Image (cartoon, helix red, strand yellow):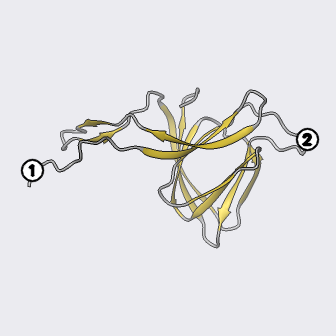
Amino acid sequence: MGTDRMSTDAPTLAYWHVWTDEHGVSHQQRRTLHDFGRQSMGGAAPQWNDVLEQKPARAMFSVLPAGWIGDWHENPAPQWIVPLSGHWFVETMDGTRVEMGAGEVSFGSDQDCVADANGHKGHRSGTVGDEAAVLMIVQMDGGDE
């Protein structure tokens, strides 16, 4: 009661990063948020926070129906995507396909891709399984994370 039992070891948080290389080809790779510091929010007991410097432009919630496919496209802005329920996938131009479920995190920053010989540009995404995927999306105000 009143005792702070929080570990003194800062946590990390893995996420998938979708990005564009210098040739305009999209990729995704596992990255880690690792700059967590203990802070109080609103006077509550300190918690671990990794505060990103880039400011959000807007937040939205999306429901992708079962069977939904978003054919090849780029993220409209750098954005954090967190599935809240259901499963979805992201496939990048390099052939990497990642499936994610509730609580997994992706950062999409594949702007400025160049279409390949098949007309693929950016990434494909869609639902996995027979239920909708509910996503929380936080679009950032320009730049990369």
Near-viewer residue (48 or 74): 48
Residue at horizontal 78%, vertical 29%?
23
Q: Where is residue 93 in the image (x, y as percent from the top left)?
A: 77, 44
- What's the CA distance linking mark 1 and mark 2? 62 Å
Q: Where is residue 12 in the image (x, y as percent from the top left)?
A: 40, 43
Residue at horizontal 10%, vertical 50%?
3
Secondary structure category for the residue under label 1: loop
Residue at horizontal 74%, vertical 41%?
122
Q: Residue furthest left?
A: 1
Secondary structure category for the residue under label 2: loop
The numbered mark at residue 2 is: 1
Residue 75: quadrant of the picture:
top right
Which residue is the site of mark 2? 117
Label 1 vs 2, first from the N-terminus: 1
Image quarter (top left, top right, bottom left or bottom right) of the N terminus:
bottom left
Q: Where is residue 49 in the image (x, y as percent from the top left)?
A: 33, 39
The numbered mark at residue 65 is: none
The amino acid sitting under disc 2 is: Ala
The amino acid sitting under disc 1 is: Gly
Q: Where is residue 125 in the image (x, y as percent from the top left)?
A: 69, 53
Q: Residue furthest right?
A: 117
Is 119 above or below relative to 104? above
